[in-house]
Image: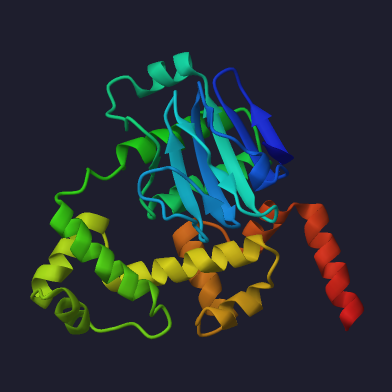
Amino acid sequence: MGHSIRQQATADIALAQLRPTIPEHAIHRHQHGDMHLVLVLAGPYASDARGMPAVCVEPALILNPPGTEHRDRFKSLDGLFLTLTMPLDAWRRFSDGIETPEGPVRLDRRALGRALRLMPELWQWDAASPLAVESIVGELLMDRPAERASERADAVLDRVVERLDDALGDPPSIRELAALVHLHPVYLARMFRRRFGQSPSDWIRQRRLHRALSAIARGRAVADAASALGFVDQSHLHRCFVAEFGMTPGAFRRLALGRSEVARIQDRLLRRC
């Protein structure tokens, strides 16, 4: 349900990069017969998936198993997203022997870097691309974290994550976070890593990168994104971006916006000079 910027397909896989074209009020509850993987790159997005906030304003990766019924939609038409679909029969063959979720779920934030590898495949499609895409999807399924341990752990970590998200530019100490939830710092650090597979400091760095990715996908200059999000300079953002996503901010910008949009933005900036 969007304007296709780029699309490719095989007998078992359809991959597309799109912009939303249908306003929120026109999208009603509907059901997907196929497996549907959505990589939200930019724009406010509402989803029924487990682990999603009421409105998500950052990049997110959502797995909708076959039979998913929902009313997922963009809240505005300035979004950007990738979709990967697989027919039910192909999904059954592909996922045979792998534990898959019963309903729609937001995949771990660490999966974003892996899922972003779909973009170069989409734009540089060749004979090996179907194998590459299937491998990426398989890795996402195998790396999916286990279900949460307990409601109490959920509540504790939700408070910690909320505090971290409010302080991306001025992070608290581990002692401050532990005091917030009345735990020993060492115990909290271990609980956090067990749940998210990374430390609180890595969480902050990753969230900052995800915000940069979203800003660049909306057309913001890389230097402006680096300055606004607290990177030392543009080269700092460049190094971190490549380490996390396997491509430069400039390369992502060209893939996300499409070459024609990048050219229009550059022409507009030149006219201002």
Q: Is residue 122 left or right of residue 114?
A: right
For the N terminus, the image quarter is: top right
Q: Nearer the viewer, residue 273 or 207?
A: 207
Q: Is residue 199 in view from this perspective?
A: no
Question: Looking at the image, how many numbered discs can be counted on the residues?
Answer: 0
Q: Residue furthest top?
A: 89
Where is residue 65 drawn, in percent x and y?
A: 42, 29
Q: Residue at the location (21% across, 57% down)?
A: 154
Where is residue 17 drawn, in percent x and y?
A: 65, 42
Where is residue 74 drawn, in percent x and y?
A: 60, 49
Where is residue 4 drawn, in percent x and y?
A: 73, 39
Q: Is residue 244 left or right of residue 72?
A: left
Q: Nearer the viewer, residue 132 or 258?
A: 258
For the C terminus, the image quarter is: bottom right
Q: Is residue 90 in view from this perspective?
A: yes
Is residue 11 depicted above or below 185 in this figure?
A: above
